Image (tube, rainbow, N blue to C red):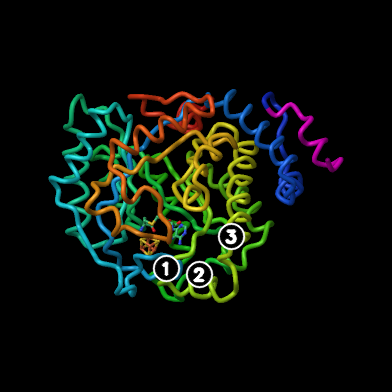
Amino acid sequence: MDKAVAKILQKDLVGNDVVTPEELSVLMQVTDEEVLAKIYKKAYEVKTAYVDNVAYYRGLIEFSNRCIKNCKYCGIRRENDKAERFDMTEEEILEMARWAYDHEYGSITLQSGERTDDEFVDYMIELIQKIKQIGDGSLGITMCVGEQTEEAYKRMKEAGASRYLLRIETSNQKLYETIHPKDDLHSYQTRVNCLKAIRKAGLQVGTGVMIGLPGQTLQDLVDDILFYKDMDIDMIGMGPYVVHHDTPLGQEALQAGLDTEKKKLERLQLGLKMIALTRLYLKDVNIAATTALQALDPLGREKGLVAGANILMPIITIPKHRAKYLLYDNKPCVDDNADKCKDCLTRRVMSIGDRVGWKANGDSKHYFKRMHHV
Ligand code: SAH
Ligand code: SF4
């Protein structure tokens, strides 16, 4: 093993030692699987010490694929007229939320394409309020419905949502501009301002990036981790970029030969390395092992847990809508139902020696410390 890498891994990272930004760059360059396994092991130790080896579930409800935006990588972008659009009914969404509660999920995530019209925001508020009336009201709610006004974020918080997930996608503004159309609707600065507004609204702030984007460098990824720190983020949801064939970026990637098995494995490795390095650097945040990992490797999500992630987002979307919410190709679990996903993921968690945090909301320890100044 490289001397510089060995020296970093000898640090007492479970204790008070920290990784420096320069050391992150050194670790980010490692590609030897044996050395990576040592990095993952260290990250797993840090995870166990700081957030415990418990996986918390956020049942994922993908309730609509209507979107006003045109992100170049995403399968449900406005201009993809091959995507069959759907909206779940309110009763369907509530039914899934009740399923999550009955099956002892601590929380759910409501995700959709982006809409900012008043009708949509009012509907979100009503939904949050109704979900909060389920059972003893303990089901945690994470919102993931894109860029909204500060006022809308505040109303969601007041209605009972506790977290908000808005990925920065990449913290390199230039790269951000190449993967989005150049117009006011897709502004990097607006995205950053939204993250600040989410925090101001009192919500736990979640962000993340896509990993292995065409044109992204290893230093970009290091900078992404530094961005999480700068923004004092509570939870991270990031995953490999996965090609969707009916998108402009997907077409580019296909033509540039970036969608071969070899390239996919590289993106998987990068995705796992990002999880591990984020754990080593930030220690007490929540980090999700996302579905995109599994799109590239059947064991992708458990590998994410082994590399330091502590959150899973089992899909609870009812079967008839699953195949229509396709952000990228080869989305796993589209033929499954919520019961199957629960059993399957639980086996995955136990297979690596973690436990499931049934009923627990699994709030970010980082958020707790931030609120209590410890
Ligand atoms: N519309 C909302 C939420 C749904 S999209 C929003 O954009 O915030 C949720 C996430 O899916 C995005 O943030 C993006 O990071 C991810 N995503 C979209 N297309 C993807 C692709 N081709 N590969 C990997 N992740 C993708
Ligand atoms: Fe819409 Fe989100 Fe996809 Fe962008 S990433 S096109 S905002 S669903």
Disc 3, disc 2: CB below 8 Å? no
Q: Mark 3 or mark 1, which is nearer to you?
A: 3
Q: Nearer the viewer, residue 199 or 327?
A: 327
Q: Residues within 10 Å of mark 3 (few under 14, many from 20)?
A: few
User: Mark 3 belongs to which amino acid?
Assistant: Glu
Instruction: Identify the residue under disc 1.
Output: 71
| Residue 179 - label | 2
Residue 359 rendering spot, x and y as whole percentages:
33, 24
Q: CA distance from mark 3 to mark 2?
A: 23 Å
161 lies above or below 192: above
Q: Residue furthest right?
A: 3
Instruction: Give the mark nearest the N terminus, 1 or 2.
Output: 1
Mark 1 crowdedness (10 Å alpha carbons): few <14, some 14-19, many ≥20: many
- The residue that disc 3 covers is 261
* Left or right: 98 as drawn, with respect to 358: left
**Which element carries disc 3, helix, strand or loop?**
helix
**Which image quarter is the N terminus in?**
top right
Residue 303 horizontal side relative to residue 66, left or right:
right
Residue 162 numbered mark, or none: none
Residue drawn at the location 57% of the way across and 25% of the way down: 48
Q: Position of residue 314 (x, y in %)?
A: 37, 40
